[in-house]
Image (cartoon, grey):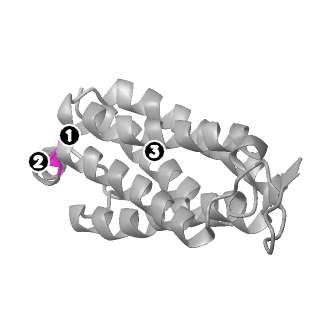
Amino acid sequence: MTESLPGKAPRSRHVRPRPLLLLLLLLAVCYAVAALGGAAASDAGSTYRSLDRPSWAPPSWLFGPVWTVLYATIAVSAWLVLRRRSLAETTVEVVVWSAQLALNLAWTPLFFGAGRYGLAFLDICLLLAAIATTMLLFRRRSPAAALLLVPYALWVLYAAALNFAIWQLNT
């Protein structure tokens, strides 16, 4: 059903957000997740340096720049899927995308804040499953959106292996 006003084009009943505003909102959500995760483990750098790590572990300074780029790609990926569709048309995609962000957010306090490396490993495995599901759902709407999540999935896979190794070396 559509509504129209004199001199105005008909409007769909399913309101779509303005594309630029939506992109800014998605970026804000992703960087809020980053900030909350960072606040939950403010001493993550020193904790990481104090752990026994495998020889292939990256230096602590690398995580900030990598995650800064990845959070942007996570937001842009969602934007590509949502920008031309209503929330009603993309509810499943939004729920799964939000779930992967929630799992992402939970990892830092589990690993660094609580020192629960095994539980953090379980969380990161669930995160990988959520990322894969997000990619599959996004691919139906926008192949580019799914491709944007590939570096994120690869980094999280690497982080899962690192999490597992640190768990084994520090228990």
Q: Is residue 8 magenta?
A: no
Q: In the rendered structure, are the residues bearing label 3 and label 1 in contact, judged by CB atoms less than 8 Å apart?
A: no
The dominant secondary structure in magenta is: loop
- Which of labels 2 and 1 is toward the front? 1
Q: Check residue 66 in the rendering and tell me which mark sits there, or answer none.
A: none
Query: Which callout, 3 or 1, points at the residue further toward the start of the chain?
Result: 1
Real-space CA distance between mark 3 and mark 1, rounded to the nearest whole angstrom: 22 Å
Q: Residue at x 10, y 51 (%)?
A: 46
Q: Position of residue 156 (x, y in %)?
A: 49, 50
- Residue at disc 3, secondary structure: helix
| Residue at the disc numbered 1 | 40
Q: Quadrant of residue 121?
A: top left
- Which of labels 2 and 3 is toward the front? 2
Disc 3 marks a residue whose amino acid type is Ala
- Residue at disc 2, secondary structure: loop
Q: Residue at x 38, y 62 (%)?
A: 67
User: Which of 107/4 is in front?
Assistant: 4
Q: Does residue 169 appear anywhere in the picture?
A: no
Q: Check residue 161 in the rendering and tell me which mark sits there, or answer none.
A: 3
Rate crowding at label 3 as few (under 14), some (14 to 19) or many (20 or more) other CA atoms within 10 Å.
some
Residue 43 horizontal side relative to residue 23, left or right: left
| Residue at the disc numbered 2 | 43
Rate crowding at label 1 as few (under 14), some (14 to 19) or many (20 or more) other CA atoms within 10 Å.
some
